[in-house]
Amino acid sequence: MKIIVRKVCEKMNRVVLVTGGSRGIGAAICRKFIAAGDTVVLNYRNSYQEALKMREELGDKLILVKADVGNRQEVKVMMDFVLTQLKRVDILVNNAGISQIKPFADITDEDWDEMIRVNLTGVYNCTKGVLPYMIHEKRGKVINVSSIWGEVGASCEVSYSAAKAGIIGFTKALAKELALSGIEVNCVAPGIIDTEMNRQFDLEELKEEVPMNQIGTVEDIAEAVFFLASEASNYITGQVLSVNGGMC
Ligand code: NAP
């Protein structure tokens, strides 16, 4: 009986760090973990007002931390703050990301560098920041948000597709390296989801490309992330969970 009580308490006291949690998919992930009783660190870069609204909505168990995930120094300060104040990070969700739609010929060197810096180096920076703690504890879950375009490639999104494919390679390799350390590393690859990122598109038109003829919701992705963060997924590592209404 005592063991069961301890396990329930442990579950309720998880500390989850969600990058890019101020809106869209990241905000839904924060809501899902808070509803389960977890403490959530919401990382944001620019959207302070949105982050504040999340705090008003979700209360004291949501902690806001500003950092550009692509900036190594800012990530170090964020990780030091979290590990000093909360003493732990049980789950890291690398969700922060930017998109860019441009023909390959129009991509500038600066566009390319920024895409890789935020979408791929950001995953590296945050994972590097929490791993010493997780390795010491011999447990932890890292969940990376890739994309269907990282799996199959998208025309006019070469840099985005390359960064998201990089996340898949990162996930598979790190999962193997950490398989004996009690740490699972997986990724979720969303299809077309209704968020700010897709405001420039006509979603009614886009949904015809989806076998289910539906655009995904932020909650669809949050559910998949939550599953990969749960004990139900303890034997799953190095995998890509594609949440895309049947696109392939
Ligand atoms: P979104 O609504 O544009 O939100 C992006 C989030 O990332 C915002 O919270 C933003 O925060 C944050 N962010 C961007 N750059 C950052 C940086 N340098 N440092 C810290 N935070 C940063 O996009 P979304 O659709 O929710 O996308 C979330 C993730 O899902 C991304 O990785 C995206 O590539 C992936 N994804 C989305 C779709 C889709 O259809 N929507 C499909 C596949 C994959 P600030 O505003 O504070 O900068």
Image (cartoon, helix red, strand yellow):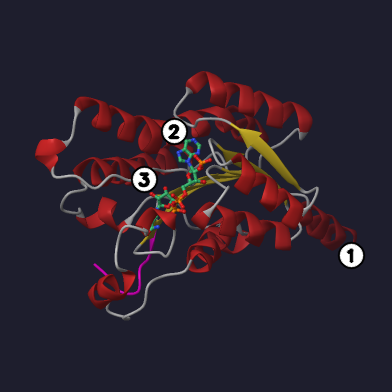
The front one of 5 and 49 is 49
Q: Secondary structure beneath disc 3?
A: helix
Residue that mark 1 sits on: 1
Q: Are marks 1 and 2 in contact (CB under 8 Å)?
A: no
Q: Are marks 3 and 1 in contact (CB under 8 Å)?
A: no
Task: Give neighbour class at mark 1: few <14, some 14-19, many 20+ (Cα, 10 Å).
Answer: few
Query: Where in the figure is residue 140, as x and y percent of width and height?
Result: 60, 44
On screen, residue 122 above or below 36: above
Determine whether the beta carbon of the residue marked 2 sits less than 8 angstroms from the nearest atom of ligand 1.
yes
Residue type pointed to by label 2: Gly
| Residue 43: image tag | none
Query: Where in the figure is residue 122, as x and y percent of width and height?
Result: 44, 33
Residue that mark 2 sits on: 122
Please state the extent of the stretch shown in magenta in the rendering: 241-248
Question: Is residue 15 visible from the viewing direction of this image?
Answer: no
Task: Give neighbour class at mark 3: few <14, some 14-19, many 20+ (Cα, 10 Å).
Answer: some
In the image, is 106 to the left or to the right of 94?
left
Residue that mark 3 sits on: 172
Q: Secondary structure beneath disc 1?
A: loop
Residue type pointed to by label 1: Met
